Every structure is written in C-alpha cells, then in structure tokens.
Amino acid sequence: MLKINDLHASIEDKSILKGINLEVKAGEVHAIMGPNGSGKSTLASVIAGKEDYEVTKGNITLNNEDIDELAAEERAHKGIFLSFQYPVEIPGVSVTNFIKTAINETRKAKGLEDMPAKEMLKLIREKSELLEIDRKFLSRSLNEGFSGGEKKRNEIFQMAMLEPKLAILDETDSGLDIDALRIVANGVNKLKSKDNAVVVITHYQRLLDHIVPDFVHVLYNGRIVKSGGKELAHELEEKGYDWIKEEVNA
Amino acid sequence: MSKYTEDDLREELKTKEYEYGFYTDIESDTFPNGLNEDIVRAISKKKEEPQWMTDWRLEAFRIWKDMEEPEWANVHYKKPDFQAIAYYSAPASIDPNKTLDDVDPDLLAMYKKLGISIDEQKKMNNVAMDIVVDSVSVATTFKKTLGEKGIIFMSISEAIKEHPELVKKYIGTVVPTKDNFYAALNSAVFSDGSFCYIPKGVRCPMELSTYFRINQGGTGQFERTLLIADEDSYVSYLEGCTAPSRDENQLHAAVVELIALDGAEIKYSTVQNWYPGNAEGKGGVFNFVTKRGICEKNAKISWTQVETGSAVTWKYPSCILKGDNSVGEFYSIAVTNNFQQADTGTKMVHLGKNTKSTIISKGISAGKSQNSYRGLVQINSRAENARNFSQCDSLLMGNECGAHTFPYIEAKNKSAKIEHEATTSKIGEDQIFYCNQRGIDTEKAIALIVNGFSKEVLNKLPMEFAVEAQKLLEISLEGSVG
C-alpha cells in the first residue's frame, strides 16, 4: 500500500529525513519508535503532504501511485489520515460540522453527492458509540477547551468517520490516561481490517500493548536503523534507546 | 386570489408607476450637477412634497453648508466633490431590449454562486421580468396580511403624502439634521427609502424586507428609512441584499431612524454588499451611513449587520437607551479584502435605569485592507445599574492587512458594570493544514474558519439571511490566501 523509497526531506535547509525506506502492506500494523528529534513527526507530516517540508530525494507511493506532487487534501482524498500529535482548535466550528465538511469534501472530490443528513447522523451515532463519545461533545467547538484525552479521542473519531486506507497515529498515546488509552486503542483495533493499514508513531511501548504491531521500526537521526517484530518494542522499553545509538555510531 | 392574473399585476405595475409620477417624463429627469437651495427645492417639488417637508430640507441644507466633512475615522480616501454630483435622478427604468446577456458575466457568475434566482437577477439589473404567478401571490398575500394588522409599509415618499402626521412627528428626532455632515446632506437631498409603522401591540407576522416592495428596486444614493414600532409591538426588518450591487453612484449617505416606543422590540438586520472596488483598489462605493434607534421604557433594539462591500465604510448603528429597562444590542461582522477600509462600530448611550447593552463585533481583514472597530459606551449619571458587555474580535489573514479597535467608555454613574473583551487572531497555517489533511481544501478551510469565527453574529440573523450571508463571507474572501 505505502512504499517509501530513500526519502530525504528538509525544512528551511535543515535536513531531517536522511533516506527512509519503508513498505506497509494492507492489513499490517507498523510501529515507528525512536528518541526525541529522530524525525518521527516529520515523517508523518511528509507523508500527509505538509508543504513546509521539502522532499529533496526519494519518493512516496500509495498503491503504486506517486503522491509527491499531490496536495495534502488530495492525499486525504486518497485515504491517508493523520491523527495529529497536537490537534488544532477551530473556534465556532463544531465537531459535527467539521467532520460533515470533511466527509462531503472528500465525496465531492470523488464525484459523489453530499452524504444525506440521515445517513450522516446514523454514522455519527455509530462511531461516537464506538469511541464512547458523549453526544454533547459533538456540538462543542473543535478541540477548543478539550482535555488531552478528548482531543485524541476526537482524532480517532474522525478516523472512524473517514475510514482511511492508511492511518498514521502520531503520538496518539501522549496525554492519555489509562482508560482513554484503552478506548482509543479499542477504537483503532475495531477499525482495522485486511484492507487498511496503521502506522503508529510512539515513544513508549504501552500503546503497543493495546495496538499490537506486526513490525517495529526504530528511527534515529533521520533513518530507520533497526526493524523487527513486536518483541523489539519490549526490548526498547527495557533497555532504552542508548544501545541503538551506540550500535549506529559504532 | 386565484383570479389575480398576470395581466392584473401588469396593470397594477403600470398604474403604480403613474402614481409615482415617474411614468411620463422619466427620460428628461436629469438635474444639473451641484447643490444649492434651488436644487433642494426642485427635489422636493419633483416629489410633490408639502411645504413643511421642503422647509425641513432647506433647513438641513443650510446646516450642511457650514459643516465640515469629518476626518476622525481611520479611513483615507479622496473626498468627493459635492458640487460634481447630480442630486436627483429618476429610478432606473426597465429597458425592454436588455437581456441578461447584456449583464457583466462576472456579476452573473457571482449570482450563480449565491444561488440567486433568474428573476431576482433580472430585477437587480433592471431587466424586464417574466411575471411568475408564484411571486405575484407572495407579494399580494404579503400586502393583504400587513393591511389586516394595520401595519404601514411603503416608500417614504408615499408616507410623506399619505401619513404626514407620523413622518412629521418622528423624522429627525433620532438623527437630527445637524447630527453630522452626511446626515445633514441626506436630510437635504434624500431620494427615497422606506417607511414602516407597526401599531400598538402588533407583532409583525413576517420579516419585512424591501425586497417585497414591488416597484422599489434600486435603493438610491441618499436613502432615508424611518421605522416606528408603537407600544408593545414587534418587527424584524431586513435591509439590503447579499447580491453584489454594482451601483454607479460612488457616494452613499443613508440615514436610518428607529423608534421603539414603550415595550416595543425592533430587530434590524443588514447585509451590505456594495461594490468594493477592484483588486487594485480602484473604484468602489463610499458608504457613509448614520443609523440610530431610540428605546423608550422596556423597549429593545437589536442591530445585526454583515458588511462585506464598499471601498470605504463609515457606519455606527447606535442605540439611545432612554427608557428604564431598555435593551440595546449590536452584532456585527465586517469583512475587508484587497484595499477596502471599514471604520464601523456602535454607540450605546445609557440614559435610563437598568439599561443593558451588548456589543459583539467580528472584524475580518484580508489583502491590504484596514478594518477598525470604533465603539462608545456611555453611561449617563442618572442611569442606575446600567450594564454593558462588549466583545471585539479580529481575525487577520495574511501580513498586509490591519485590524484596529477603538473602544471609548464614559461612565458617570458608579453603579455601572462594563465589561470589554477583545481578541486578535490569525488564521494559522496549522489550522489550514489540519483541514487540508481531512480533505478540506484551503479555500473551503478558510470559509469554515471564518464562519466559525463569525458564528455568534450569524446566529442572530434570520434563518434564510444567515445561509446567504455565510456564502457571501466565503465569496468575499475568495483568493485572499495565496
């Protein structure tokens, strides 16, 4: 589904990604771990198409189509979803109105009519139940005054509504208490299928107890320096990242 | 009603025009440029006004002659040459040979985006209308219902003739002729406008909109509106149109006076979309408006405005809270783009006890425009327990526009409670990217953010107006982020 070939990216002439190679197939869950500043969030932003970053070398394909030239919204229309580490506030725009707009814009891009209101409401009810979201929450302004947990739950709610092919969860576990973590992870697990894929970006192993990865990659200094199965996450949890750094620098 | 046919309407329109006295020599109705007492007299004569009205206009003219054009607003423009303007022109006539194909295609494209019907488009461009039975029935039902309730709704020219006692009693009582330069000018030369009277205890059953006043297409350069809500009555009044008005007149100086007698409530909503000039700042309407209402005991006046047009806007819809327990509200969205300049806000003058006012102002600036909020909250020494809440929010798009807030507070009574909140924000790239990532393109993302920002005010508009206003905001800001 997603293929990243020798990807180099920089921001304001500062090189961040220095040759990433990664392949994610449908039905798989990949975890990307690594110390602070290793380029994890940059990788997520570059896949999603944030314009601040310049791809200097390499490319990204989604279902064998090169997406380098596509704008962020076009990538979204093709099924890429990013759960933000720091979701932004949009005052005066309710959660419902926002997701309705997102869905209908995506449908429009595919030449479809707006989703009928009845169908939309049904979908909202279904997905908010899945994520144990209170209905009152849906009429609040997007992310305004939300707690950390509410913000992340809202991200996964949007993911559930949009049903992406490739979901990238950027530090979705940060700011979550144990109950919220369970709810979010449950949501992601229920949305998983053989046709979609999930990339989990995280510092810690605890989210991976709930969303079990098929592959774990360690990102360090802009490169994937180690890949393995889920047991690699446990090893990192136990030993930290220093041994990896030493290995790389040796 | 089923007997009312297209022919009847055609006949009615014809005789109506005759009533107005415009029918016979429309084409020759051109006054020379410039303004003097003879011109003022001629305008009054042309409109077959009684002597008291002529004298009132002349008085206003003499006051105006000695006044200076105000310069305190945060706007910069080349002052109009008041002697180079023609102060009387007959209403634009319908050209039977004109079709929509003759109309500026840009304008038509905009109409389409706003979802304006073909008939409305024709009406706005003085294209002869096909008469649709549907609109006939709406107009006649409308007239009938209002008549039954004793509501008077007509042009001010008609009212001067048909209800002189009401006009004489109230005109100039809220905005005196000497109030300001433009108000004095308007008083001397006003062309036409609306008059409305709601009798005691009557709740006007529909939104009153000039749109329904058949035969009253263009609003004119010096519009005069007088609205009287008698004791315990209620009216919601809609002014303007979301459709872009490409008026040839550069200077517009309107006066609106609202009178809310004991226990009455007036809701006055405006959408202003005059030609703002082109992207280089050439052309566009100068909009210098004086709008003010007076509230007697337990009365309430609520102003809601969406201002997206005009090159220069100078406008402060205000409330004089004269009666005890009266309430004044001002909800405003002002959008400026390209080289537009707006200096707008309100005055809340608290005279009575327990008077309350609320001000919510949302300014949106884009391009190289300048957008100022200017507001006065004045608490008189006898206004015990007066309350005011003001909130002024500015939203900036890009780095070349400006947002300014000039709040003035004068409190002469210690029991007054005044709150003022102000925020300035910018549409962030992070917000845009967040929307983009959800499949919403940048143009739509801006519309969403702007609508969210303006929501508190949009919610105050009557339903169908709110939907149009939302679209209008979108269109006004199109292309404002590169």
Image (spheres, rainbow, N blue to C red):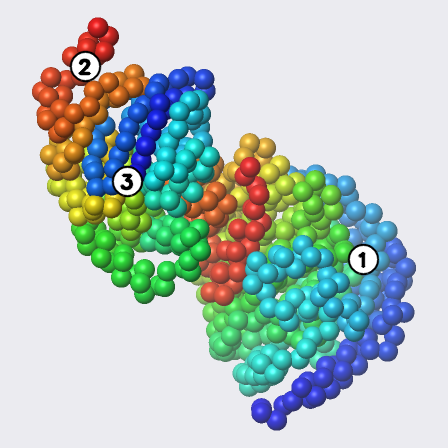
Q: Position of residue A232 (x, y in %)?
A: 13, 24
Which quadrant of the view contains residue B220? bottom right
Nearest the viewer among A173 and A208 is A208
Name the residue located 28 percent from the left edge and 36 percent from the top edge.
A168
The numbered disc on residue B61 is: 1
Name the residue located 70 percent from the left edge and 40 percent from the top edge.
B280
User: Which three-letter amino acid code belongs to the residue tagged 2?
Assistant: Ile
User: Which three-letter amino acid code belongs to the residue tagged 1?
Assistant: Phe
Q: Cα distance, mark 1 to mark 3? A: 71 Å
Secondary element at tag 1: helix
Q: Which residue is mark 3?
A: A167
Q: Would you call the spot at circle 1 few (<14 residues within 10 Å), some (14-19), or many (20 or more)? A: many
Q: Earlier in the sequence, mark 3 or mark 2?
A: 3
Query: In the rendered view of the protein, which quadrant contains the N terminus of chain B?
Result: bottom right
- Judge whether A233 appears above or below A131 on screen: above
Nearest the viewer among B18 and A148 is A148
Q: Which residue is mark 2?
A: A244
Q: Position of residue B394 (x, y in %)?
A: 50, 41
User: Which three-letter amino acid code belongs to the residue tagged 3?
Assistant: Ala
B235 with respect to A247 (left or right) = right
Query: In the rendered view of the protein, which quadrant contains the C terminus of chain B?
Result: top right
Q: Cα distance, mark 1 to mark 2? A: 88 Å
Q: Residue furthest top?
A: A250
Asked whether the residues under the numbered discs 3 and 2 touch, taking CB atoms below 8 Å apart as contact, a structural biologist would say no
Secondary element at tag 2: helix
Q: Position of residue B294 (x, y in %)?
A: 56, 61
Chain letter of the residue beneath label 1 in the structure image: B
Which quadrant of the view contains residue B353? bottom left
Asked whether the residues under the numbered discs 1 and 2 touch, taking CB atoms below 8 Å apart as contact, a structural biologist would say no
Secondary element at tag 3: strand
